[in-house]
Image (cartoon, grey):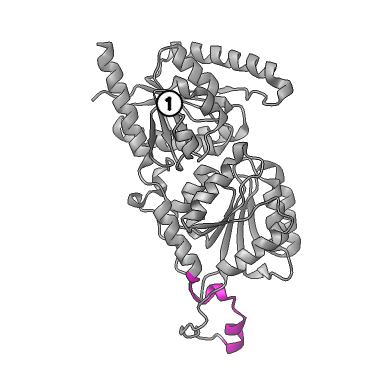
Amino acid sequence: MSQMQNLALCGGGSGGHLIPAMAIAEEMLQVSPTTRFLFITSDRAIDHHIITTCGLPAESFDHMVLPLRSSSGRISFAIQSFRSAVQCIRRFRRVRPNIVVGLGGFASIAGVIAGWLNGIPVVLLEQNAVPGRANRWMRHLAVQTFTGWPLESKWRGNWRTPLLEVGVPLRRCFRDDEGAASPPTINRQTTASVLVLGGSQGAQRLNSIVLDALTDPNFGSGHLQVVHQTGINDVDRVRQVYAQAGISAEVCAFIDDMPRRLESATLVISRSGAVALAEIAASGKASVLFPLSVSADNHQLRNAEFLESCGAAVIVREQDYDAPLQLTGQLRRLLESDDQHTTSSPEPGTSSHEERSLPQTVVSVNHQRAAMENAARRAAPQHAAAAIAQSLLCLTNRGARSAE
């Protein structure tokens, strides 16, 4: 079997586009260790951060200026897309990839077009239940599309390019056979930990809802530990509100060690991008989901509805006026024990008053949450990245035989 020499990974603008590329690259190195990767991404800071910290053997790292999407910027969009495509064509002529992978997002357009014009096989990755506009535009140029969360039926029937449903590609650290840890056992000595994921670009509305809920004096969140990913632009405000409320919170712009953070979390509050949901599910965590209300074609809501239908998550709509109140209700339900007849004995030195004052979350496992965690594991995709890597290698071999 031939080795993949160069693989172009084109797209970006968010972690949801680039993190699956990292997973595929990891698996490709398992079957073709000499593969070099050409990254064509957007000019956003998150793309640069992910690529430069991934530890993968990058042949090149080029970025395309993300085109404008407003109606008044259509001419600028076309001009910038053309310039970026020319830049990619020149790059691919210097270092010709065996395959071009379109990761989705407007930053993928130039690379996909350049690959197609150069006669290089193009494949697409679509993680969401509703495909993004870039992939919808480019689907006729591809020889294969790999899908993550089940694609809505209206799109499956009209895609024309062959579809292969493999699941969302996850990094090896999230796979069961790579030693992914099971959820921590909740006992008397543990403290409930809430992980808040606003997405790699942040989510000011979600941040505000979470702050309103957790700082509500009637909620009593003093017993919680909070890890809150805010995005770059909201770190200082969120950190200040937690400090003023006396809540133990670690606030950061972006989380690099997501497996460890998920492992130690009792419950997750998150946006519902495809990759975030797949990582939450693979970690076996119950979640409260806030789909981005302005996401293209409402795809985040469709993603969340699939996980909710599995019994692994609950949805709160951020546009609801009482969203903070709904969140506090869900937190109480999922963090308070529904086992009122625990028979565990007190720890030595613990008075009966101290025992009564302990939050119920640290007395016994919440059965509702445990059921959601089991459902999450069943919904988690497994070996998607490995399946994609093998398919790409087979496609390379077919191309090599055709050229002989």
Q: Which residue is mark 1?
A: 160
Identify the residue at horizontal 51%, vertical 55% (top origin). Answer: 308
Q: Is residue 41 above or below residue 178?
A: above
Q: Nearer the viewer, residue 367 or 17?
A: 367
Q: Quadrant of the C terminus?
A: top left
Identify the residue at horizontal 71%, vertical 54% (top origin). Answer: 320
Q: Residues within 10 Å of mark 1 (few under 14, many from 20)?
A: some
Residue 218 at least partly seen: yes
Identify the residue at horizontal 66%, vertical 40% (top origin). Answer: 294
Q: Residue furthest right?
A: 244
Q: Is residue 383 above or below residue 192?
A: above
Residue 288 lies in the magenta-colored region = no
Q: Nearer the viewer, residue 237 or 403?
A: 403
Residue 62 at least partly seen: no
Residue 254 place in picture, x, y as percent: 59, 44
Seen in the image, is 23 located left or right of residue 258?
left
Q: Quadrant of the N terminus?
A: top left
Amino acid bearing label 1 = Arg
Seen in the image, is 66 located left or right of residue 38?
right
Residue 224 place in picture, x, y as percent: 61, 66
Q: Is residue 321 above or below residue 88?
A: below
Q: Magenta span covers which residues?
A: 351-367
Identify the residue at horizontal 41%, vertical 55% (top origin). Answer: 377
Seen in the image, is 135 located left or right of residue 387?
right
Q: Is residue 65 above or below residue 263?
A: above
Residue 143 place in picture, x, y as percent: 39, 23
Residue 304 place in picture, x, y as percent: 54, 49
Residue 362 lies in the magenta-colored region = yes
Location of residue 201 (image quadrant): top right
- Helix, strand or loop under label 1: loop
